[in-house]
Amino acid sequence: MSPRLQPRCFPLHPLTLAGLMALAAPAFAQEAAKTDPENTLDRVEVTGTRASLQKSLALKRNAAGVQDSISATELGRFPDNNVADSLSHITGVSISRTAGGEGQKVSIRGLGPEYTITTFNNRLLGTDSAGRYFAYDVLPADVISGADVIKSTQASLIEGAIGGLVNLRSASPFDQKGQRGLLRVEADRNQMSSLNGTKLSGTYSNTFGDQVGVLLGVVYAKRDVRTDTAGNDGGWSRNPAPNKPELFWPWGNTWGGAIDPNGNGQLDPDEEGLIGPGQFRFGTIMEKKERMALSGKVEWRPSNDLKVVVDGFKTRLDSPQVGYQLSFYPLYAPGRWSNMKITNGVVTDFTLANPNPELALNPELLNKTEYRVVDTAMYGANAEWKLSPTLKATGDIYESTSKRHSGGQDSYVVLRMNQPNITRIQLTGSAVPDVKTTFNDGRDLQTGLAQGLFTAKDFNTHYFSLAGDNIDDKISGATGNLEWKVDRFSIDQLKFGLSETHRKKSRDLINNAFNAGDGHYSGANAINVGALGGNVINQTLSPSGFMDGVSGNFPRSFLGFDINNYLQALKAYDGKPRPGGGTYDFSKAAPAWNPLESYRVTEKTTTAFVQADLSGDGWNADAGVRFVKTKTTSQAWDAKILDIIENGAFNYTAVYAPPSVVQQESSYNFALPSVNFTWLITNDLQLRLGAAKTMARPSVDKLAPTSTTQSISWGDFTQVFGGNANLKPYSARQADVSLEWYYAKDSALNFAVYQKNIKNQITSEYLTGQNIGAPGGRLFNVSRPINGDKATARGFEIGLQHLFDNGFGVRAQYTRNKSRSWVGGEERALEGIAPATSSFGVLYEKGPWSMSATADHTDAFVTATNVLGAGFNERAKAVTWATAQIAYEVNKWLRISIEGNNLTDATQEYTLGNDSVKLPQGYYRYGRSFTLGASLKF
């Protein structure tokens, strides 16, 4: 399985330490600078770590609201390969990681990616996800010069964020006039991969007088990574508990009947709510990442009153993944388990020894591939025109697109062992249980895999899923603003603005589940892989250091099979008799359009705002209101179940009626007032206050009325609803208080508190024993997104940054979040919010040397609620991520560096349970990585 992606905080890079230490300061800080002797010195150009610190601190101190920033040290030299990795350095920001440990999603103040908006030069970015969140791994950091994380809000800022707004900024050729350029080469090595990665990037900038400037950038990077993984995702079974209402689990989710330790065929009182494993798997994911990007900007400044900018970028991320895993499905069925031992309501030890092939344990080989090629682009034009000394107009138009077409190109293909065996499974609390499988011919699974004792003839064809979705996202927008300088009655200026945004997002799922092609070669129609030929099983995998951090006795070698060879072998088998009737026909197993999880969503938003910027003796403020009108149209498809065919144990085929169109429309209006106030207590100490009403739109996929019953194929009768156009947006009333002390040059201590009262947060409900009109009166579980009642998120941040004159520096921060959520009048945890994050970093920079080390920590947090009944939640374990860097300026042109990432070899792990039970749920190990780089500037 691909890594479960949940919000969490990771490493701090030395080049952006400033982004963590001081929250925003008022616009009138320039007035304070007039009385500060340190600010009256002649300008000295500084590069390196301290340059980044100074830039970021200045941006914060002069911001209108609560804001943190990160900046490139100079043209083309952004500190990380990926923007999310850089954002993770900011106080209160956490990220989730994809395969290889690269940052992908961003959360602010504990609130998940769905509460966050990402813009590029204040323009919305198209996304390749099914929803709204932006996957940062598609965007090389080289195309931006900085980023602002805005935690409070203003009427003039784009709406849609409750957690915060991330605005990525591209460089201007006028930032450093004249001809400038940077060429950078990198090589990296990942502990988990025997292959090395390379990167080449270049940036060129030139200005022609004071009127024209040009900036161009290019990036090419290639990297191979490995992620070791283990999981029980959805793999725990729990007996019904009809007489224990406190468990809120009346129907249970066991597939083969209630777990019955005493074998009397009845659900006894002491068996209610009993838990046992349903499936578990472990293996490794190999990923080859290739990233390319082109960016450019042209600025024309014909006069002091007019500036026109045309800019854009285009990126391609090509990151195919192939996962090789060993899977076990010890699902309970009468007569299947024996010698059961129960500890604290969990079956922790049992044996599978039934001679019936369908009831024996059949270890499986899993080949899971993901074809991910993402094309992202943005093009726009912006103009600023000073109509008079008191009136300025700005206009902006843009188009942003994202495209990922992987329909039918992803695989989830299983080969099943067909040899009689006896297996004992013991839960130890580790990420993988102890597994001892002995076959009737004397071979042992653990040693036999390592010694190559198993061949293709030991396996049959089984589950055969070819899938993937085609996602297209297109956003176009236009904005017009006016700024009128008033300079009377404490009003500095009035701002007015109008904007319109059109978004059209479509998803077409292409798979072979809807047409039952995934079962064409399973059950009675299984084919012995040895008879297929075609060199399908072609390797034994014993990855170096595989699962080193996981204790227990289980196979640490496994076979891998080639999916392309497998497809060709199946096609060559066409025409041979099929035991279930007819002949084998690969075309019947080929992927086709699946209407049940496809959708079209269009969203039209019109906004208007008015804002007054005010100031006085020792204070400044802004107050305004933003009006938002959104209309949504969504289209999906439904298909009723006509028949359910049982092919064998845990193997079913659903027959559907022709699909019918489902269309929904909705609209909503918001008035979003906001006010910010900053009091300069002294030149170095200031207090900032902010209050606002904010909103966040539901994820795009949650607006589409899709539903699926695909899980019928493996015996889990659950209908999953993807969304509903009538879901209400989140809204929140929030307040911020920040006390900031800039007690020394480039040093600061800050303390901030915040409160967010959220309404209509989107969560999910899980109903058991529902009649959905399926034939035979079969009852289904139903999962659907719903609006909750309310939620609160509150917390505080404290940050310290101090730079000593001798070149040393220290950075520390701590963020504490506390959240509560109510759904249906009952309190439950708010998913995805880490209760605390912290980090500590030290640095040294003097002369040509620059060094640093940083450790970032995220506490454990809830990722899903009520998974197996009331209070039975999934949680991400605490994690600490460490990095270190050393760089040397050989001369004014050449700089070399080496960086180590995840130096403690931290893993991300998940558990499932309540106060008394903790079950392993997921494990991901990314390994250490090291990057050697050299940059040449001119």
Image: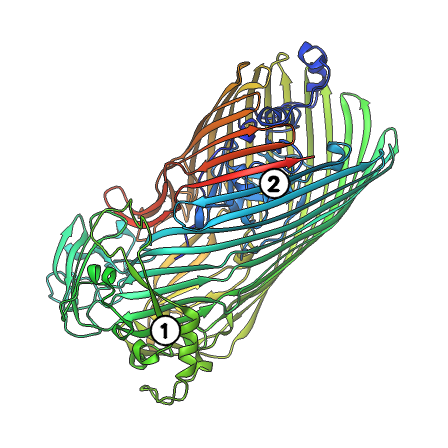
Residue 557 position by quadrant: bottom left
Q: As rendered, which of 373 and 807 lies closer to the eye?
A: 807
- What amino acid is at disc 1? Asn
Amino acid found under the numbered disc labelled 2: Arg
Q: In this picture, is 818 found above or below 237?
A: above
Q: Is residue 217 visible?
A: yes
Can residue 159 be seen here? The reply is no
| Other residues around mark 2 within 10 Å, as few (<14) / some (14–19) / many (≥20) | many
The residue that disc 1 covers is 535
Kind of element beneath mark 2: strand
Near mark 1 (Cα within 10 A), the count class, few <14, some 14-19 or many ≥20, is some
Residue at 59% x, 39% y: name it.
165
Q: Is residue 283 left or right of residue 815?
A: left
Query: Residue 919, position in %: x, y?
Result: 26, 49
Per the image, the residue denoted by label 2 is 184
| Extreme residue toward the front, this view | 890
Quadrant in the picture for the C terminus: top right
Task: Relative to 352, say whether 737 is above or below.
Answer: above
Q: Is 248 on the left-hand or right-hand side of 14?
A: left
Q: Kindly identify the residue that appears in the image at 38 percent across and 74 percent down.
A: 774
Q: How many marks?
A: 2
Alpha-carbon span between mark 1 and mark 2: 43 Å
In the rendered image, residue 348, in percent from the top left (x then y), is placed at 18, 53
Name the spot of residue 304 as percent of width and height, x first: 86, 32
